[in-house]
Amino acid sequence: MFLRTFGRLAVISTMACGASHPPPVAPVTPPRPKLQLAVIPAESDAFPDAARAISRSLAAAKLRGVDQTRVSKASLEVVQLSIECVDATAVCYEAIGRSLAVNRLLFARIDGARRRLKVTITLYDVDAKAVTRTRVREFATEDAATAGADALVAEVTR
């Protein structure tokens, strides 16, 4: 009987002493918010082949740190009309990003007359409200623009 009582007391006292300090708790770090990119396809009635090639290049682009990429079904002009902000300004680009619920925008503008065309590729940071990178290149022909689409997009997205 004495041994049983002594054994129980030993176990209880060991448990009481061992639990005097709680184990350290690691600080909880919130998960990094997902970075989302919207790719907006190029559109041009005057240079449709170049627009298709540039749109394919934009859609295939990979940006470091981006968790999710969504390709818009609508062109930049259509998206701008839908939010009633048609200027090529940071205010309009931010409004586009907010309406698409993304952190970054990747898009192209194609301008030109006759056979010469100017292609502008832009990466816009919606959170920072600023253009991250932009490249402008003039091409002598639509075929040259089609052939140079991948390289031009790569300059902006690397």
Image: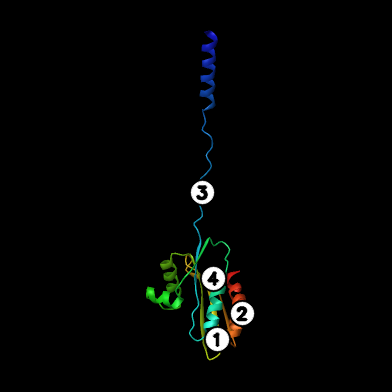
Whichever of callouts 4 and 3 sits on the residue coming sooner in the sequence is: 3
Q: Residue at x 59, y 81 (%)?
A: 146
Q: Looking at the image, tell me whether mark 1 or mark 2 is earlier in sequence order.
A: 1
Q: Which residue is mark 4?
A: 59
Helix, strand or loop for disc 4: helix
Q: Which mark is residue 29?
A: 3
Judged by depth in the image, the label closer to the viewer, 3 or 1, is 1
The amino acid type found where label 1 is placed reads Leu
Q: Amino acid at mark 2?
A: Gly
The quarter of the displayed image where residue 10 is located? top right
Which numbered disc flags the more N-terminal residue, 2 or 4?
Answer: 4
x%, y% of residue 74?
Answer: 44, 74
Q: Which residue is mark 2?
A: 148
Q: Position of residue 133 (x, y in %)?
A: 55, 72
| Disc 4 from disc 1: Cα separation | 21 Å
Disc 2 residue crowd, few under 14, some 14–19, many 20+, Cα 10 Å = some
Name the secondary structure under disc 1.
strand
Q: Separation of disc 3 and disc 2 at Cα?
A: 44 Å
The residue tagged with tag 2: helix, strand or loop? helix
